[in-house]
């Protein structure tokens, strides 16, 4: 994940076991999860985030 986004985005990792309120605030009820805030409208992905091809398609360089 960090390798894909290193030059184009910022990443904040939240341990939902340590910060449960943040998980609730961001509608994270299943892990693993990835919340993309910008560009609008954003999206919320759940499940395996190991597919480099899928992640690359989300974070295309413009």
Image: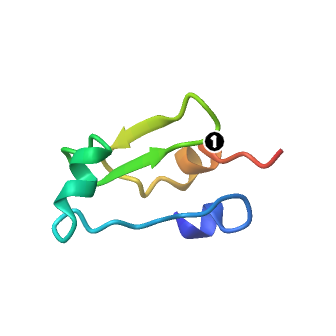
**Which residue is at a point 17% across and 59% down the rendered structure image?**
20
Seen at 43% across and 58% down, the residue is 50
The local crowd at label 1, few if under 14, some if 14 to 19, many if 20 or more residues have their Cα within 10 Å, is: few
Q: How many marks?
A: 1
Q: Quadrant of residue 22?
A: bottom left
Choose top left, top right, bottom left or bottom right for residue 13.
bottom left
Can residue 13 be seen here? The reply is yes
56 sits left or right of 25 in the view: right
Q: Position of residue 53 (x, y in %)?
A: 58, 48
Q: Nearer the viewer, residue 40 or 60?
A: 40
Residue 49 point in image, percent of width and height = 40, 54
**Position of 42 relative to 11 (above/below):** above
Q: Position of residue 57 (x, y in %)?
A: 63, 42
Q: Which residue is mark 1?
A: 57
Give the structural element (helix, strand or loop) at label 1: helix
Q: How is the image coloured?
A: rainbow
Residue, x 54% and y 44% (percent of image)?
A: 54
Classify residue 42 as left or right of residue 46: right
- Provide residue 4's location: percent of width, then percent of height: 62, 62
């Amino acid at each position: 994940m960090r390798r894909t986004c290193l030059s184009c985005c910022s990443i904040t990792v939240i341990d939902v076991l340590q910060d449960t309120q943040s998980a609730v605030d961001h509608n994270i009820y299943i892990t693993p999860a990835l919340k993309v805030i910008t560009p609008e409208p954003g999206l919320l992905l759940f499940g395996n985030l190991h597919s480099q091809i899928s992640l690359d398609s989300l974070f295309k360089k413009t």
